[in-house]
Image: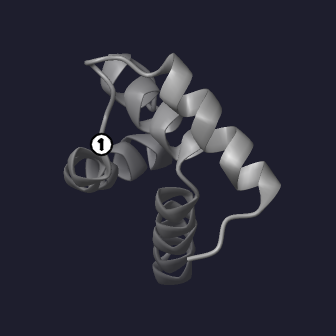
């Protein structure tokens, strides 16, 4: 996977700002379903949701997965 300068800056910023309580991609996968369901109900707030949103802001791969999941759910509605 080739990274462009914006990806490198985002990853560097995330690395510098990350701490032991940060969500990993694997943890994110276990939380994203609940996150999207709460988002659809208009209840996407709280510490877990903040962690998920922060991870997505820094992780391009997970952001793409979230966009695809949202699109799939919108198609079903």
Dot 1 crowding, Cα within 10 Å, few <14, some 14–19, many 20+: few
Viewer-nearest residue: 24 or 37: 24
Left or right, residue 65 beside residue 37: right
Left or right, residue 65 beside residue 33: right
Residue at image position (69%, 53%) is: 7
Q: How many numbered discs?
A: 1
Q: Which residue is mark 1?
A: 24
Residue 1 falls in image quadrant = bottom right
Q: Above or below — where is 20 with respect to 13?
A: above
Residue at image position (46%, 59%) is: 62
Residue 27 spot, x, y in % from top left? 22, 45
Evaluate whether residue 6 shows in this view: yes
Q: Above or below — where is 46 with respect to 77?
A: above
Evaluate whether residue 42 shows in this view: no
Viewer-nearest residue: 20 or 57: 20
Viewer-nearest residue: 46 or 76: 46
């Amino acid at each position: 996977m080739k990274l462009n300068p914006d990806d490198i800056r985002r990853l560097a910023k995330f690395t510098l700002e990350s701490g032991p309580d940060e969500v990993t991609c694997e943890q994110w996968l276990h939380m994203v379903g609940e996150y999207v369901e709460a988002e659809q109900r208009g209840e996407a707030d709280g510490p877990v949701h903040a962690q998920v949103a922060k991870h997505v802001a820094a992780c391009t791969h997970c952001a793409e997965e979230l966009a695809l999941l949202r699109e799939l759910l919108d198609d079903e509605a």
